[in-house]
């Protein structure tokens, strides 16, 4: 026998059922941190479009962005992501080579120009499932979200030079083991200094110059105090990664994970393309600021080519001796460049 519910009882029953299921999705807060000034092109071409895309899609994600080392130094970003202090962190392999040695492969002075060739070759190895992802990121409990490999670095100084011989003995700022090897090959003195500290070091004479791409001179005002620069050479590059811990990744809903994955693929192409288009403009900015562009002689170019050509093999052998897959990573990256 069925008993009809009174209007009041029916109302109470429906209210109870409604309370048993979620009525609205909780906002997901994600903290992003890096060391770049607000005017820097890397967050402009990566972090900004990421946040704008999520806002437009209404996926219930609220980003908190902390630039300019507000949350910590560059060298500490990996640890901050692993500990959960930061959710998405800018981690440059050059600053944590002991933790991510294979990622430095994209910083070697290899046969590529611009940004996109290096970026895409590295991305295919470093995104989830790739060789570098398995050997560099998974052991550290993190995954790559998006990356940018910068255009080949030039040697920029305050002291006048016209030949490689003129550069011998100069103190040159660099980052990472690959570019350190490159500088030693031409008898300069490599000095490791975090990027935000380069301006002060150069202005005080702590260093005589630095390896930098033209794109990165204006964001740090280095074009204003530099005097000479090579042009058209390749002293190596730099990898800018934004990582998330696997622990944080596991807490994100499927739609958010899928959107971040899709954005990684898109940013790998769009950011490097913008950087390549900017390079000619930034060379002009350097020239207008008074930097003299030095084209090395044919003889010096030959010497430099031979020196840089030996860096990659030596780097790979050094990594192999540490029990890591240096040669495997080098071969895979060079195959990707082709």
Image: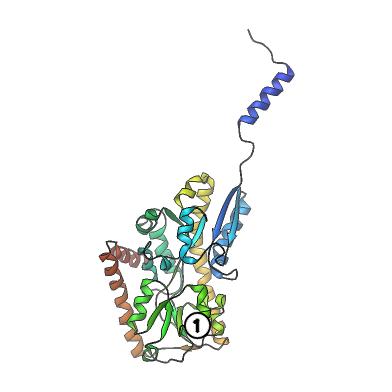
Is residue 156 placed above or below 25 in the rendered structure? below
Q: Is residue 168 left or right of residue 37?
A: left
Q: Name the residue under label 1.
A: 202
Percent across and percent down for residue 312 are 31, 72
Secondary element at tag 1 = helix
Residue 319, how many percent across, how many down? 29, 66
In the image, residue 251 above or below residue 100: above
* Residue 74 appears in the figure: yes
Give how far across and how far down residue 10 sits, in percent: 70, 20
**Occupied quadrant, residue 40:** bottom right
Q: Dot 1, crowdedness within 10 Å: few (<14), some or many (≥20)?
A: many
Q: Residue at x 66, y 11 (%)?
A: 3
- In the rendered image of this protein, does residue 114 appear above or below residue 26? below
Report the side of 93 relative to 89 (left or right).
left
| Residue that lies at the very extreme toward the right in this rendered image | 7
- Image quarter hosting the N terminus: top right
Q: Which residue lies furthest to the top in this view?
A: 1
Question: Coloured how?
Answer: rainbow
Viewer-closest of 243 and 287? 243
Closest to the observer, 80 or 183: 80
Total number of numbered discs in the rendering: 1
**Residue 176 location (% of width, % of height):** 39, 71
Residue 108 in view (yes/no)? no
The quarter of the rendered structure image containing the C terminus is bottom left
């Amino acid at each position: 026998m069925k008993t009809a519910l009174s209007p009041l009882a029916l109302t109470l029953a429906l209210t109870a059922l409604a309370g048993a299921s979620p009525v609205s999705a909780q906002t997901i807060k994600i903290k992003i941190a890096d060391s770049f000034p607000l005017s820097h092109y890397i967050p402009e071409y990566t972090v900004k479009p990421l946040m704008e895309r999520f806002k437009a899609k209404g996926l219930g994600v609220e980003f908190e962005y902390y630039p300019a080392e507000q949350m910590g130094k560059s060298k500490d970003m990996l640890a901050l992501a692993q500990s959960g202090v930061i959710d998405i962190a800018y981690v440059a392999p050059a600053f944590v080579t002991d933790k991510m040695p294979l990622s430095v492969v994209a910083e070697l002075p290899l046969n590529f120009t611009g940004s996109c060739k290096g970026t895409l070759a590295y991305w295919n190895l470093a995104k989830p499932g790739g060789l570098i992802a398995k050997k560099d990121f998974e052991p550290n409990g993190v995954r790559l979200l998006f990356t940018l490999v910068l255009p080949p670095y030039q040697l920029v100084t305050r002291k006048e030079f016209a030949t490689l011989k003129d550069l011998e003995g100069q103190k040159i700022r660099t980052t990472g083991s690959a570019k350190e090897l490159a500088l030693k090959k031409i008898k300069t003195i490599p000095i490791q200094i975090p990027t935000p500290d380069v301006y002060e070091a150069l202005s005080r004479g702590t260093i005589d110059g630095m390896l930098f791409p033209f794109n990165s001179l204006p964001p740090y005002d280095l074009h204003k105090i530099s005097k000479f620069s090579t042009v058209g050479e390749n002293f190596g590059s730099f990898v800018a990664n934004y990582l998330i811990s696997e622990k944080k990744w596991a807490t994100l809903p499927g739609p958010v994970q899928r959107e971040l994955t899709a954005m990684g693929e898109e940013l790998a192409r769009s950011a490097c393309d913008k950087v390549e288009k900017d390079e000619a403009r930034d060379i002009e900015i350097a020239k207008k600021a008074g930097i003299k562009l030095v084209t090395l002689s044919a003889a010096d170019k030959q010497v430099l080519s031979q020196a840089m050509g030996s860096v990659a093999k030596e780097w790979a052998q050094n990594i192999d001796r540490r029990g890591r897959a240096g040669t495997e990573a080098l071969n895979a990256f060079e195959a990707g460049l082709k």
